[in-house]
Amino acid sequence: MLYKMHGLSRRIYPYDQEAPEYYPHSYMGYARGRWDGNDYVIKTTHLSRNVRDFNGGNILENIQIVERFTMSDGGSRLNMVLTLYDPENYLKPPIRRRALVLKNDTILYPYECDPDSFFRQLYNEKRMEEFIKETVKKLYHGTDRNYSLCSAS
């Protein structure tokens, strides 16, 4: 399985496929997935040293993260339980719970680390022209100038 998140690719290999000796540590690590009944379980190793979302704690290179994904009965909610195994930093494994809710009318845009994401969203929502006009009004203290997003004046 291959998916992208925050601009990074992550491969999830079959559970019986061990990481090769040469496999490098990375922010996505080496992930292996398997079915456990109706749950999909992913075990990730080979993570680079960094700070994870578990209260900002350090992550060392020898940790493991186990993710368990469970679909709700109606199929409209994906529940996730993430467990971090890092005995050097934690007396007991911290657990993080997340849920994704299916919304059929959601538009998914590609993730881009973009300093202009505010403006890109306005553009995608066809509200850029309105934003520019309001901004120009504020800049010129309400003077009645007619500016267009695409004008070449």
Image (cartoon, rainbow, N blue to C red):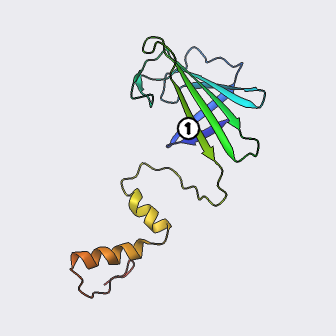
Q: Nearer the viewer, residue 60 or 106?
A: 106
What residue did someone put label 1 on? 9
Residue 108 position (above or below residue 127): above
Residue 141 position (above or below residue 97): below
Residue 24 position (above or below residue 10): above
Amino acid bearing label 1: Ser
Quadrant hosting residue 145:
bottom left
Q: Say which quadrant the N terminus sits in.
A: top right
As drawn, which residue projects farthest toward the right?
37
Relative horizontal placement of residue 146, taking residue 19 as reference (left or right): left
Relative horizontal placement of residue 70, taking residue 92 as reference (left or right): right
What element does badge 1 sit on?
strand
Q: Residue at x 57, y 28 (%)?
A: 82
x and y, in percent, of residue 86 in the image: 49, 15
Residue 56 position (above or below residue 5): above
Relative horizontal placement of residue 57, taking residue 80 as reference (left or right): left
x and y, in percent, of residue 85 in the image: 53, 17
Relative horizontal placement of residue 17, taking residue 120 as reference (left or right): right
Q: Residue at x 64, y 26 (%)?
A: 42
Q: Residue at x 60, y 30 (%)?
A: 81
x and y, in percent, of residue 133 in the image: 34, 78
x and y, in percent, of residue 39 in the image: 72, 30
Quadrant hosting residue 30:
top right
Circle 1 Cα neighbour tier, 10 Å, few/some/many (<14 / 14–19 / ≥20): few
Quadrant hosting residue 121:
bottom left
- Counting labels gives 1
Q: Say which quadrant the C terminus sits in.
A: bottom left
